[in-house]
Amino acid sequence: MNKAVENSIIKDLQLAPEGHLKIDWAQAHMPVLSRIRKQFEAEQPFKGLKVSISLHLEAKTAYLAKVVQAGGAEVTITGSNPLSTQDDVCAALVEDGITVYAKYNPEPVEYKQLLIRALETKPDLIIDDGGDLVTILHSERPDLLENIRGGAEETTTGILRLKAMDKEGQLKFPMIAVNDAYCKYLFDNRYGTGQSVWDGINRTTNLVVAGKTVVVVGYGWCGKGVAMRAKGLGANVIVTEVDAIRAVEAHMDGFRVMQMTEAAKIGDFFVTVTGNRDVIRGEHYDVMKDGAILSNAGHFDVEVNKPELAERSTSIRTVRRNIEEYQLKDGRKVYVLAEGRLVNLAAGDGHPAEIMDMTFALQALSLKYVNEQYEQIGKTVVNVPYELDEQVARFKLESLGVNIDSLTDEQRTYLDSWQEH
């Protein structure tokens, strides 16, 4: 009997055939991760170890789980957002021998329990998304810490939480900041988020973007991608920021920069990508145009303050799948997409497979690295070694059939010399 079938908590195992098709499609477009899978099959870096993963549980994540499993691990996986879990993918993973604790849109209490169940396997290694596993281990369930060697974190939000813990001396094991790797933020955060956010918004609203005013809240790498793609769709783009350097960058990239109190008056679409809370709130709702559409691409559903919007509303109704209409007291209507959760995953399929190919290659290699080096790293947050970052980039270039130059010995000597040339 498949142990995963006995232990898993999913919606319906009969959904597996559709899930397998989705995973096969993702795998066919993830050549870098497939190359690492072959290495793992030969080397067995995780033989005899347990790995627990919390990520947005869809096809690309499923393939990462299978790659880790191919490296010899006993893998358990759970979701990292109630609305991004795909039940057919969960079923397919269970058939493949991976224990799954995840369902689409569980109640908050059940969602938390599913995260805890993934940790109750007492893993040796973890992959986290947003810091939920790490937070549970350090607050509610420190009894599950005993076997943890280390892990890797996927998101900006998660790394902010980890660095806060690290600063206070609270972190009990090493974590690799995968989000801070070049092959993560330059491509996943920028091109992945940029495309997938608009995939989610467009399929949900079925409205034109060209000629509309789009307000991008936050100009980090994700915000850069969202703004760039909005511009490509023909939108007039406004950026709001609290960081002066990023604000100058947005200005020089050709976008209008202003305070949210002013942007709120003229925006048609709003996309939050800050990792912070209440960046759209009561004072902004008071001046918004009738028909304004709000969406969030940050990890947690706190960027758009829904309670303050509800307080100003006379009615709330679902007018289309993943669209809530808030009827304000003065008659204006404001719309919130995907309950204010990650619009690209809650209302879409997430980043393109070719983008996640690089990100999940980093995750797989980082997990191998932390397993080999956890004692030397210590209980802290560290960056992905540059050698791994470059390795993923080279694998990607090879998969594209692209060749680049190498330095000559004379050029290396020149760059390494401090004397006059």
Image (cartoon, rainbow, N blue to C red):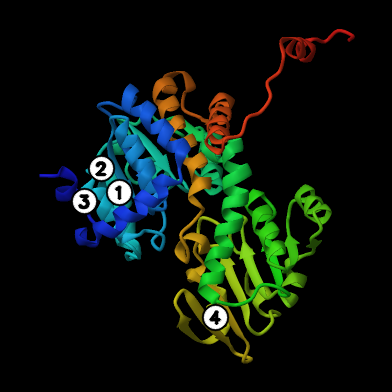
Q: Earlier in the sequence, mark 3 or mark 2?
A: 3
**Residue 138, image x and y in percent?**
39, 40
Q: Kindly report which numbered mark, 1 or 3, lies closer to the viewer in this rendering.
A: 3
Marks 1 and 4 sit apart, C-alpha to C-alpha, by 33 Å
Foreground pick, 278 / 43: 43
Q: Nearer the viewer, mark 4 or mark 2?
A: 2
Task: Find out whether the residues at labels 3 and 4 contact each other: C-beta distance under 8 Å.
Answer: no
Q: Mark 2: which amino acid?
A: Glu
Rendered image quadrant of residue 327:
bottom right
Disc 2: CA contacts within 10 A as few (<14), some (14-19) or many (>=20): some
Q: Is residue 18 above or below residue 246?
A: below
Q: Amino acid at mark 4?
A: Glu
Residue 8 got which mark? 3
Can residue 297 be seen in this snapshot?
Answer: no
Q: Which mark is residue 15?
A: none
In this rendering, the label closer to the viewer, 3 or 2: 3
